[in-house]
Amino acid sequence: MGIIVKSLSKTYGSFVALHDINLDIAEGELIALLGPSGSGKTTLLRIIGGMEVSDSGSVLLDNENQANKNMRDRHIGFVFQNYALFRHMTVFENVAFGLQVRSHKLRPSKKEIRSRVIELLKLVQLEGLEKRYPSQLSGGQRQRVALARALAIKPKVLLLDEPFGALDAKVRQELRRWLRKLHHELNITTIFVTHDQEEALEVADRIVVMNRGKIEQAGTAEDIYHKPAGAFVYRFLGQVNHIQGYIRDGSVHVGPLTLKTAVPESVNGQNVDVFVRPHAVGIASECSTPDMIAARVSHMYQAGSRIKVELEAEGIQKTIEAEVTEEYQRQIGLSRNQHVYITFRKAKLFGPDGKPIDYEASYESSSLQAKEEARIPQIS
Ligand code: ADP
Ligand code: MG
């Protein structure tokens, strides 16, 4: 079922929770609503699901206005972060619940319910656990029961509100891979709410980034990552160094550092927000090109297969976060308190209006680290 959200607004007293939300979701699409806490994700989901009423605007499911329909008639399945299963009911009874409570006329036979529940438990990979109680399950298993319960009514839309939020990182990762696969099999239109950008990038066909009750950008993971509509989106999608810069004579000046590539005439004389991802900070033990500044390693730690490096750079007020491969760290013998030289191999610029300035500094060729890293075969 396709979903169309038109000029939806919602206020709580004088607080604007949603402001003029417009969104088209195609049949079978898996959409992630991504945004910080308080950005309006749950409110939007609840209005789509009919659990909350908007002040203005409309929600169309398969082109039908839902204003006068109650929740049950919308054919919507819900899973919440802490959707406690019924504790006194077995897994079987929990999954069967949505079917059992139907009026006599609409209720499937006992036998039909049984086969549907068994089929669903197989789908969520919990076969054989139907007699267990929720307390006898792991967190990940419980959320899969919740999903089976949501699927029991054969929903046309699935609304998942931070369904894996309470689980630990490893289980979460397994479940999102599993959800992706499940969605591929069932193709139910799904809205997945999360505040975790990695989760959104991994799971969804399309991501809707929300901030303060508004949609900042909607697009594929690639679009959003590489062509952010604004500084908020770029920042929210991953760790980034944010430094104030200034444009003079067609160059970008960041502290004592000059990024030499030409920028449009129109932005000359402007202050800009300069964003540099940690992996785009070049580090070298010697000053090999003029576009480098002196810095000191203030902290270093292992993060997965890479090394995170924090640097205090001359003339820049903020701690710079960088990231290098283990090989490169060993090669230049990078260690705490070491004096090094840094440069920004790539940067994204945003004007005072928060909009991107179409320009990318590229220092790949002049950076020692880029050369060295390119020389080292990456095993992954
Ligand atoms: P999110 O799910 O993105 O964290 P919510 O949609 O839950 O955000 O909330 C958006 C904002 O609306 C929050 O600031 C929250 O405090 C406010 N809000 C949500 N529900 C209510 C309510 N029933 N009454 C008053 N304020 C609310
Ligand atoms: Mg929420």
Image (tube, helix red, strand yellow):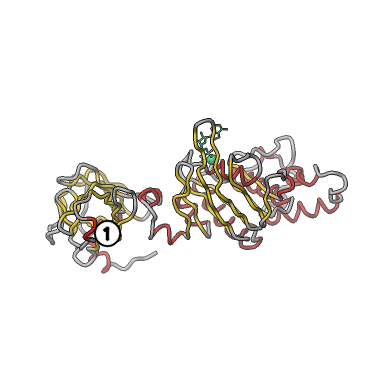
| Residue placed most toward the observer, 182 or 4 | 4
Q: Residues within 10 Å of mark 1 (few under 14, many from 20)?
A: many
Pick whichever, 223 or 326, lies toward us. Answer: 223
* Residue at 49 percent of width and 49 percent of height: 34
| Count of marks, rendered view | 1
Q: In the visual, does 295 lie left or right of 281?
A: left
Vertical side of 263 occupied by 193: above or below? above
Q: Quadrant of the C terminus?
A: bottom left
**Is 138 positioned to the left or the right of 168 in the image?**
right
Classify residue 215 as left or right of residue 375: right
Which corner quadrant of the image does residue 261 belong to? bottom left
Residue 287 image point, x, y percent? 12, 58
Helix, strand or loop at label 1? It is: strand
Residue drawn at (66%, 43%) of the image: 50
The residue under label 1 is 346
Q: Which residue is drawn at the image coordinates 73% and 54% (left, top)?
A: 154
Residue that protrudes farthest toward the top in the picture = 13
Q: Is residue 77 above or below residue 181?
A: above
In the rendered image, residue 293, in percent from the top left (x then y), is placed at: 15, 52
Q: Is residue 166 visible?
A: no
The quarter of the rendered structure image containing the N terminus is bottom right
Residue 42 can be seen, yes or no: yes
Image quadrant, ligand 2: top right
Position in image of residue 125 (x %, y %): 66, 54
In the rendered structure, the answer to whether residue 186 lies left or right of residue 344 reads right
Question: Which residue type does callout 1 highlight?
Answer: Lys
* Front in this rendered view, residue 232 or 92: 232
Q: Residue 88 at x, y = what percent?
A: 73, 35
**Which quarter of the figure has residue 358?**
bottom left
| The one of 293 and 60 positioned closer to us in this rendering | 60
Mark 1 residue's CB less than 8 Å from ligand 1: no
